[in-house]
Amino acid sequence: MTISIDQQKENNKSLQPNGWLRYFSFSLDHKVIGIQYLVCGFLFYLIGGTLASAIRIELASPMSDFLPRDVYNQFLTLHGTIMIFLWIVPVVNGAFGNYLIPFYVGARDMAFPRLNAVAFWLIPPSGLMLIASYFVEGAAQSGWTAYPPLSITTPQSGQIIWIISVLLLGGSSIFGGINFIATIIKLRRPGLKLMQLPMYCWAMLGTSLLVVLSTPVLAGTLILLSFDIVAHTGFFNPVLGGNVVVYQHLFWFYSHPAVYIMVLPAFGLVSEILPVHSRKPLFGYKTMVFSIMGIVVLGLVVWAHHMFTSGTPPWMRLFFTIATSFIAVPTGIKFFNWVATLWGGKISVNSAMLFSCGFIINFVFGGITGVALAQVPFDIHVHDTYFVVAHFHYIVYGGTVFIIFSSIYHWFPKVTGKMLGEKLGILHFAITFIGFNLCFAPQHWLGLNGMPRRVAEYDPQFEFVNQISSIGALLMAISTIPFLVNIFLSVRNGKDSGDNPWNALTPEWLTSSPPPVENWEGEAPLVEEPYGYGDPFFGENKKI
Amino acid sequence: MTTLDSSKEIQNNKSEVSENHEDFRMFGLVTFLIADGMTFAGFFAAYLTYKAVNPLPEGAIYELELPIPTLNTILLLVSSATFHKAGKALLKDKNSDSQKWLILTAFLGIIFLICQLFEYFHLPFGLTDNLFASTFYALTGFHGLHVTLGTLMILIISWQTRLNTGRITSKNMFPLEAVELYWHFVDGIWVILFIILYLL
């Protein structure tokens, strides 16, 4: 007696948890893992956002009256760590990467599905452990940079838990990176050339190279730091003959590329979204690819621009200033390519497009202040002030988080088969955009006038501007409400989207929405022109 | 019989339906080893920077004896060769020969670890004595951890080579090749470590 394949498939299906349950299982399906990353990351975003709101409420008045000083330091550290390691990196790499990359390369799953699931399931426990450290003996207090000797002298248990969870999250990130590189290089559908891949693949390839090359250095550094804390060695402890600047070099060797790990995938995602909603081919595909790779190479040799005030010798300052300024070239190429993609296009004004355009505006601001910060004289003036805080929030929030929201509006129909409501989406965008700029634009002024970052109390002359900033932060907090309501309403009774509501040409839209378990009913389609909009020769989807 | 038949049929159908890709597991392993190598690169960079800019206090002891580490270098180099022999033997379907070579390799790894511990116990400085001592123990300790893991993996695959369950045969060499590549990597790291830490 034999069982037919269909029966067998049915049997397999009944063994796998269905519906909502599969999102809580050790699923090997890349789509399930992608959603797991996204939802898990969003929950941590809500926690990190609550911490940020508490910080801004504290900063609405010059004295520390809302939070005790040490709690303020803990909130600050937790906010930074959660937002970077538990929200942006997992979501912009893990969530969208896992969901989209197999579609883009024409595969049925990632190269190493089991490793993929392991990489995800490292995240929730280490995130919970990090947050739990607050309730044990107080969380780490030395900021997300954990600079020694501060991290050695502050209470130890929180710092050690911080190190362990960052090590686990780094491991998760490395496993993910290995998986993405193998999938993009080795798992491409036969006939699909590298230069035909959608831009997000290139962005993820570059990002994963950075992850694989730089994250292990952070891991090694944190192991040495934990030796300093637990075993009282003197690697980074000047009292015992160690050298704090070595920590800074090793730390920033990871943490500067980490900026690109957070923002390069966003570059890729916006390059997918803009052509679809402006009905034009992506402008300058080849220059986009080369500028991504240029950013990867340059991104590895600019780390010491975070250390211009750490007694860096003049030749080093010169080299890192020049190298950092050079990064403006590939980044500028990408910026102008996006603008040129929009130029003369048939632009539809919807939530996804609005968030993408918001990204372009915010990102050019953050980019300009970035070039300014690369100049040594200016950097020495504003080092460790709110100018730096404003700069990097313009990159990671105004840049990456805007793109995360844009991508959620763009790919929600793909995942659920339902459209997200446009009215609430536009409301969400309006409050986020106004709140964000109200919160962070005044901080440039604060920094230029010398308000130091990471301190709970400040000179009363800055009170008014800080209050404006806090109002902006509360607007940002409020902006998640229309978003959550929108998701809730749309999942329950949103209107059906059909398979391809945007008439997009990238491969993930050439299957049903939501996609079947192995992505395609038959063979994967060969998409040679993922951006062939408005071109008479590539107007039709090329299905095989 | 039913289960056997159906599973066979699924296998057949699978090979028809699924697109054939070349084996990319080795590619993934190489990527992982590059990442692992970067951890060592970070340690080496830290050590060399300390050597260049952080002079040790007066009277600090940082002299190392050469005989044991030289012996250890030879042990690891020989073990790389014996591992290679194991792979060759497996290719010729001589599973028991292959297993003997693997056990010899694991034995050399264990001797390496014993020598390393012997050196630790006879060194005139401890972990927290000075910066050089801390870096020395961190570097060799981290490498020793890799050797320990490698030795365990060699013992596991030598066990699997002997079992005739088809886990490791001349047609499915991947587990052996993967551990071999890892072992050569650990060996190569030791050579760099030996040059930087003991000879420079």
Image (spheres, coloured by chain):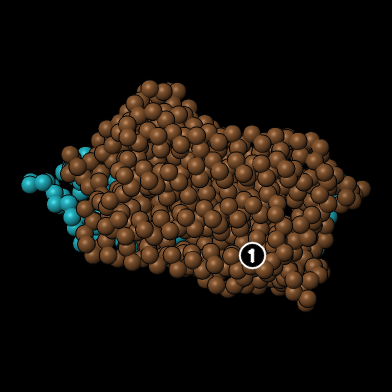
For the point 43% across and 58% down, the residue is A368
Callout 1: SS: helix
Q: Is residue A155 above or below residue A341?
A: above
Tag 1: residue type? Leu
Q: Residue furthest left?
A: B58
Q: Is residue A42 above or below residue A323?
A: above
Percent coordinates x, y for residue A276 in the rendering:
71, 61
Percent coordinates x, y for residue A54 in the rendering:
47, 29
Percent coordinates x, y for residue B50 in the rendering:
22, 53
User: In the depicted view, which residue is nearer to us: A132 or A432?
Assistant: A432
Percent coordinates x, y for residue B5 in the rendering:
84, 51
For the point 88% across and 47% down, the residue is A7
For the point 7% across and 47% down, the residue is B58
The color chain B is rendered in = cyan
Image position of B181 (left or right of B57) = right
User: Which lettered chain is shown in brown?
Assistant: A
Q: State which quadrant residue A469 falls in.
A: top left
